[in-house]
Image (cartoon, rainbow, N blue to C red):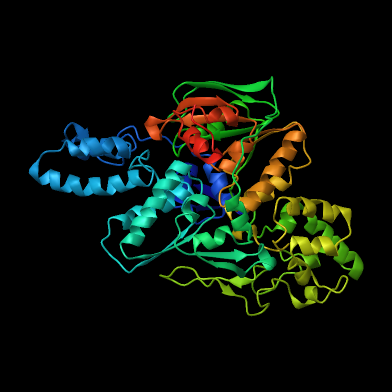
Amino acid sequence: MDFLRNNTGQVSKLPYEGVVTRFNRLYLNRDISGLKQEVQREAMAFIRRRPCSSCGGSGLNPKALASKINGYSISDYYAMQVSDLLPVLEAIDDPLGRSIAGQIRNCLRHMVQVGLGYLSLDRRTDTLSGGEAQRLKMVRHLGSSLSNITYIFDEPTAGLHPSDAHRIGELLLDLRNRHNTVLVVEHSRQILELADHVIELGPLAGSQGGEIVYQGNLEGLKTAGTLTASAMREKPVPNPAPKPWTEGYAIEHARLHNLKDISTTVPKGVLTAVTGVAGSGKSSLICGEFVARHPEAIVIDQKPAGVSSRSTPATYTGVMDEIRRLFAKENGVGVQWFSFNSKGACPVCKGKGEITPDVAFADPVAIRCEECGGRRYNPAALGYIYQGKNIEQVMSLTIDQALDWFTQPKIRRPLTALQEVGLGYMTLGQPTSTLSGGEIQRLKLASELQKTGNIYVLDEPAAGLHSRDVERLLKLLRRLVVRGNTVVIVEHRPELIAAADWVIDMGPGGGNQGGELLFAGTPEQLCRCQRSETGRYCTYLFGKAEG
């Protein structure tokens, strides 16, 4: 490309690769996952993904795809659901292939055992839920003959249907019976009832927890005075007076993923629970089809809250602006002094509280900033005081403590909402990137408590919650319904299913064995649907006679 230099008449030549070539080099021919989120979003706005017309998305060349066993190519094997692949492998009778296929079948049977028979082998692992990923890791150890190994499972049944949780329990017992030590961090009543030894921490959360309140066998726990013991002594009771409804939101001929031409109605102005075993089509029906047909619905998911890695409960709720104004007015300085993104930031770590040295050939390791000691603010900012505390000390207050300390309505109102959703133990300055999925979901829910006339969709809001927290969550969902909102939850917890006004049950199995509408009615009526795994479990749990 030619251009004139400074109007001097001198002509210079500058090679220019072109917009398309440059875009391909910068964003398509490299892994962009390490770039800033804003840059990734901008690049993805110009990118459309579709399967390759030559290989069909398999990534294999024509010669590889032309090689077949019993009429199936390697791509066909990958695309099959695991439960369907097993009989195909059993049909291989070649002496050499039979031995290899037998080893593969053993692994696939373990996948079916942990309730993952509906997955295909070409499913990308980054599309798996946390529970699915954890169960997939379990599969690697189930065929092992090792003993005297210590296994630690963090909520292995989170997000699982009771029938799937029962399978997990059997596998944990199998690991124990092979002379291994199995430690499980869990809230599930089903898993607790299998334990040989129970350690309960509490009595509450955050600064009010951290103590061992019970240690012993299961029988001793049932008579203890702890929150977990109290929850185990109680049994869910089906909603005796479901809220009636006349209007609803129609879903007609839904065929997303494994849905088999489903038509149903989500009631308006009530609490609806959508149930079914893993992979039965619950999320496809609600988070896919329902939300697509009713875009006004507000989805409260467990994805990270806030657009910045520096987001905190104080910044997410907006109270941080009010706190900065209080400090600025008290000290006669600008509000930017009380932000670790501006003048108040530590000059070394730039307000992060830590530094990450760029070390070649090694994973990045975050080190606490030596200049500020992880406090994120510089000495000048920390020198300004409001009612005896500096900005860093205020950010270290829990939500409960902050409500006792602040009197300003603009600060108290959002913090009260956080307390109501059970997050009173969190500090104002805790990075939202450190919150669990359930905490993120409740953080988002807090901002919706005063609204009316909306549709709210929550995917497994009780995942990872103690029974006491589930009770609090149920009160919040009821509060939304009372204010004229429609609430739809995709859920497995019996406490929430029992308390719902309406239940939509999917199944009967997962993957291509699911996708059918098995039941739509009240929790009481669900107990009489014997084709439903959820119905059978509720019959047992609620103590109802089969009918």
Q: Extreme left residue here?
A: 95
Could you tell me residue 306's position as x and y percent?
66, 52
Can residue 500 be seen in this snapshot? Answer: yes
Can residue 62 be seen in this snapshot? Answer: no
Tell me if 62 is positioned left or right of 410 in this view: left
Nearer to me, 538 or 326:
538
Tell me if 167 is positioned left or right of 400 in this view: left
Quarter of the rendering containing residue 398 = bottom right
Tell me which residue sits at (72%, 66%) in the image: 340
Could you tell me residue 128's position as x and y percent?
44, 46
Tell me which residue sits at (54%, 49%) in the image: 40
Does residue 164 sit above or below 314 in this rendering?
above
Could you tell me residue 129's position as x and y percent?
47, 47
Q: How many marks?
A: 0
Tell me which residue sits at (27%, 55%) in the image: 143
Could you tell me residue 432's position as x and y percent?
64, 57
